[in-house]
Amino acid sequence: QVQEKWAIETNILEDGKHIVPDIVSSIKHRLGLYNLTKEDFVGIGMGSPGAVDRNLKTVTGAFNLNWAATQEVGTIIEAELGIPFAIDNDANVAALGERWVGAGNNNPDVVFVTLGTGVGGGIIADGNLIHGVA
């Protein structure tokens, strides 16, 4: 269940180098606001456009974020917050969210298509997110 939702500006200047520090700063602010510590969390998950390496926790080619080069997203967030971090493609993460709390009604089989600045999609079969090759 979503407890709170907030948004921050996405500063894509200087090759998007401010995005991850701004995310960290925003999370630290919320932790302080609610007197939460890293022990209160199992982990942090994030969806990103571009080519996501889930193992290295990096993103390459998210051009709408001005991330042409590889971005070290996960290592920075984990080091700054001390909370385990997972990242996947934004369309895959949207498919999971739609399955859990949206039109998917927690069905084990969901196909999700995104149309926005790009076109993407996610497939959940037998309750498992299917990862392909981009």
Image (cartoon, rainbow, N blue to C red):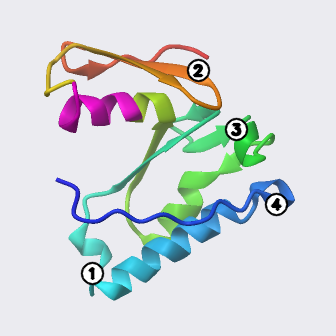
> To which residue does mark 3 refer?
62
Query: Residue 100: within the magenta?
Result: yes
Q: Residue at x 27, y 81 (%)?
A: 36
* Contact flag, marks 4 and 2 (Cβ < 8 Å): no
* Along the line of sight, the residue nearer the viewer: 67 or 71: 67
Q: Amino acid at mark 2?
A: Val
* Contact flag, marks 3 and 4 (Cβ < 8 Å): no
> To which residue does mark 4 refer?
13
Q: Nearer the viewer, mark 1 or mark 4?
A: 4
> To which residue does mark 2 refer?
119
Q: Residue at x 72, y 41 (%)?
A: 64
First of labels 3, 4 by sequence position: 4
Res. 36 mark: 1
Residue 60, horizontal then vertical, whole percent = 70, 37
Report, in whole angstroms, how far the alpha carbon at label 4 lies from the one at label 2. 24 Å
Residue 78, horizontal then vertical, whole percent = 48, 63
Count of numbered badges drawn on the protein: 4
Q: Which residues are magenta?
A: 94-103
Report, in whole angstroms, how far the alpha carbon at label 3 lies from the one at label 2. 13 Å
First of labels 3, 1 by sequence position: 1
Quick one: which residue is furthest to the right in this view? 14
- The 10 Å Cα crowd at callout 3, few under 14, some 14 to 19, many 20 or more, is some
Taken as a whole, is the magenta stretch helix, strand or loop?
helix
Q: Amino acid at mark 3?
A: Ala
Residue 32, horizontal then vertical, whole percent = 36, 87
